Amino acid sequence: MRILITNDDGINAPGLATLHAIATEIAGPGGEVWTVAPAFEQSGVGHCISYTHPTMIAELGPRRFAAEGSPADCVLAGLFHVMKEAPPDLVLSGVNRGNNSGENVLYSGTIGAAIEAALQGVPAIALSQFFGPGNAKLADPFEAAALHGPRIVRALLDKGIWDKEDYRIFYNVNFPATPAAGVKGTKVAPQGFRRYAGFSMEPHVAPSGRQFLWIKGGEQARPTLPGTDVTVNVEGYVSVTPLRADLTAHDRLAELEGALA
């Protein structure tokens, strides 16, 4: 198996090294793992692509490239340049430093890379590691992802739903903020919503007198509705969420059509 890996924390992020180990195990002795990751951190860029300016790319080593662009740019670079002659069978994105559960899905560059892969018709899985008191001070805070990641990716490849719709299914996997031994299991869960923990802005004045606005995040570990991704992560489970890039509110189409008739 040929696997392309990327992330949004940057080419030197520890989580990318964890993902490379996961991908190497999945690819097997005869497989290949190729890395195309952002040269600098790209957290929070979502599915952004560098449409208005070129993306510089540099080869750092065998099958290892850094691109001055977003995670979605990196997927495009992998598909149409780096691996053009023999495209990947799978794209893995992560392992993100911090969760991509709940509304974080909409901001995440990690998810953005998986979206782009799915739009290009390539199976994709995004992986993220929840951070909290249970794992932040471990020697390896990614150990839950490192231990359980290969099993979950393999299970999705063997038993997951991989359709060929226009907006294909891809998967969002979040590991709880626990040591590897503390993971209670895996649960399929829908995307939750943190009702009291959205992003905000906080003004600061620099020594020069200029005013700057800093984005401020909210509390991450407050449970969402029962059974949703944030809640099962907080309860110690790995969440697996099937996603599509289609944002249509299908459950409201008929109602709106009737209202506007």
Image (cartoon, rainbow, N blue to C red):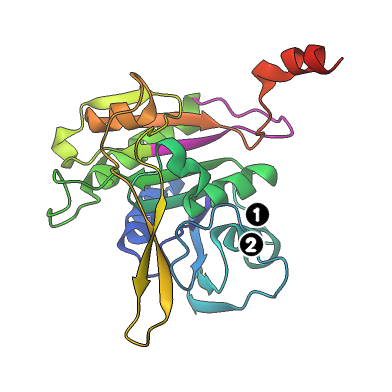
Residue at position x 61%, y 78% from top?
56
Q: How many marks?
A: 2
Q: Residue furthest bottom?
A: 208
Judging depth in this view, the residue of 59 and 239 nearest the camera is 239
Judging depth in this view, the residue of 180 and 239 nearest the camera is 239
Tag of residue 87? 1
Query: Is 239 located above or below residue 260 in the figure?
Result: below
Image location (x, y in percent) of residue 29: 42, 51
Q: Amino acid at mark 2?
A: Met
Q: Amino acid at mark 1?
A: Pro
Left or right: where does residue 179 sit relative to residue 58? left
Q: Main secondary structure of the magenta part?
A: loop
Query: Is 245 located above or below residue 64 in the figure?
Result: above
Which residue has dot 2 on it? 83
Judging depth in this view, the residue of 212 and 146 nearest the camera is 212
Residue at position x 52%, y 71% from top?
65
10 Å crowding of disc 2: few (<14), some (14-19), many (20+): some
Q: Which residues are magenta?
A: 160-173
Q: Secondary structure at mark 2?
A: loop
Q: Secondary structure at mark 1?
A: loop
Residue at position x 67%, y 34% from top?
246
Q: Are marks 1 and 2 in contact (CB under 8 Å)?
A: yes
Image location (x, y in percent) of residue 242: 51, 29
User: Could you say which quadrant of the image residue 152 lies in?
Assistant: top left
Query: Is 167 within the magenta?
Result: yes
Image location (x, y in percent) of residue 191: 45, 29
Q: Is residue 29 visible?
A: no
How far separated are the C-alphas under marks 1 and 2? Answer: 5 Å
Tag of residue 37? none
Q: Is residue 54 visible?
A: yes
